[in-house]
Amino acid sequence: MITENLIACIPSSEGKTALQSTNPITQQMLPERFVVATPEEINKACLEASKARKIYRNKSGKKKAVFLRTIADEIEHLGDVLVNRAMSETGLPQGRIVGERGRTCNQLRLFADLVEEGSWVNAIIDEALPERKPLPRVDIRKMLVPLGPIAVFTASNFPLAFSTAGGDTASVLAAGCPVIVKSHPSHLGTNALVAKAITNAIQKCDMPNGVFSSLNGEIETGQQLVQHPLVKAVGFTGSYAGGKALFDLANNRPEPIPVYAEMGSNNPVFVLSEKLKNHSQQMAETIANSVNLGAGQFCTNPGILVLEQSEIAQTFLGDLTKAFEKLPSDTMLNSGIHSKYIKTKNEFLNSNRVSVLFDSTSESWKAGPAVARVSASTFMNNGHLQEEVFGPFTIVVVCNNKKEMLEVASMLNGQLTASLMGTSADLEESKDLAEVLMEKVGRLIFNGVPTGVEVCSAMHHGGPFPSTSNSLFTSVGTDAIKRFVRPVAFQNMPNSLLPSELQNENPLGIWRTVNGELTKS
């Protein structure tokens, strides 16, 4: 296993400090020591990425597709070595890691299909109209082009799917940009294995070495990377504090750059009356299991439930409490996440007018599930009750009537998702609620829990601030590629000099908008 930094595929270990991952189950440090990147190594990675961008951006979509598929193949060839290492660094079960590996490779292949077909560049051609009156029109052609070197921060809670070769890296490489990955201190070995797989793919596909680098480090490494003048954008999945700090750094640069930060969410679930009446126990178990999935360490964890006060609501609260009592405690990813969970959970449970329905013991890095209750008026008058508790916790907001449910929805912060649980009659009567929630979220879910994010072209995994730093973009699905490109218009450019996507003959055979008509001609 490579314990150095990988700079343009070459191992580098100039630093004198090192990091070690810890097994969350045993709480013992793993033996490998991963050398922290120096400022000079960070600079070199950025310089090599900048050199590579000139070559890589001109590689055909077909060649990029082969590259992405080869990365997926190389990851799969790691077999149990990768699975076992990821398990030892995260405490996650084998099934979860195997599933996440599959998702990672499927994402790479999905982007391969996208760039191989090629129409994603959104080529638009408005041909010259020299005879137009009163003024002629010049020839204008536009398409999306790569931004340049991109910094990607790996996520603590997804050691594969949102990490070294995860959705951010896949979309960066698909867009034609080099990527510099900052590994997460919690799964350094997993990062090293996947980084070597990417390096193997680079060599097999004759890609420029600088298209990928991997750096070890902590906060200072990330800060230096974001502030480097050759870095043109940032992909981040993590906490609000971390994402906002990077966002501020990037915007205070002499040349500000976009930070696409996914920073967590409460994912409110609104449970409507008829649904409660007919499915109280089933709803309670479904929601409780969603809250506790993966020890609650998902950005789509349902952290707020909203319902209307009634006799059946009281029955549901009893069913929900019983469902939480059956839930097991589960190991969290690291000591910092565990400590933060205990702290924020206790702050909630000790807040004025918050009633504890169930709270289990949390110790030895294990997260005990908890659920509390609060009135809508208390919730709306205490902004801190909207803060995310990253772990298996949810708070039930009890409203006096439908009008108050609408008021709660109206004052919610931006969210990744919101869910409406209801019968057909419930949903027909709640169109106004759905309208309000649509303004608050990136994904509105009907009769389903928010945990589980399908990787497909229609998915939007993003939402209004503070759930993400830019609600126009997604970090999941093929549209994620649009974060790392920008439009360029070419005016009266000779046909032979135009990118292939914009040439008259359409040599790539892609879909284009020509004089307002979508066509392949």
Image (tube, rainbow, N blue to C red):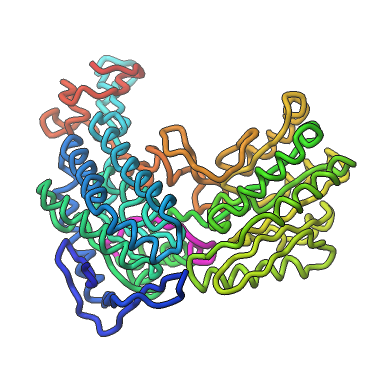
Seen from the viewer's position, the closer of residues 364 and 193 is: 364
Seen from the viewer's position, the closer of residues 448 and 258 is: 448
Q: Quadrant of residue 365?
A: bottom right
Confirm whether the magenta stretch covers residue 230.
Answer: yes
Q: Quarter of the image for the N terminus: give it.
A: bottom left
Image height check: is 128 above or below 35?
Answer: above
Q: Quadrant of residue 295?
A: bottom right
| Residue drawn at (26%, 14%) of the image | 131
Q: Is residue 36 in view from this perspective?
A: no
| Residue drawn at (71%, 40%) of the image | 283
Image height check: is 14 above or below 191?
Answer: below
Q: Where is residue 359 in the image (x, y as percent from the top left)?
A: 72, 64
Image height check: is 1 above or below 108?
Answer: below
Seen from the viewer's position, the closer of residues 14 and 195 is: 195
Confirm whether the magenta stretch covers residue 81.
Answer: no
Q: Start and end of the magenta stretch?
A: 229-244
Relative horizontal placement of residue 10, taking residue 28 as reference (left or right): left
Relative horizontal placement of residue 189, taking residue 279 as reference (left or right): left
Q: Position of residue 32 (x, y in %)?
A: 28, 75
| Residue drawn at (31%, 77%) of the image | 31
Of all residues, the one furthest to the bottom in this rendering is 16
Q: Quarter of the image for the C terminus: give it.
A: top left
| Residue drawn at (39%, 61%) of the image | 87
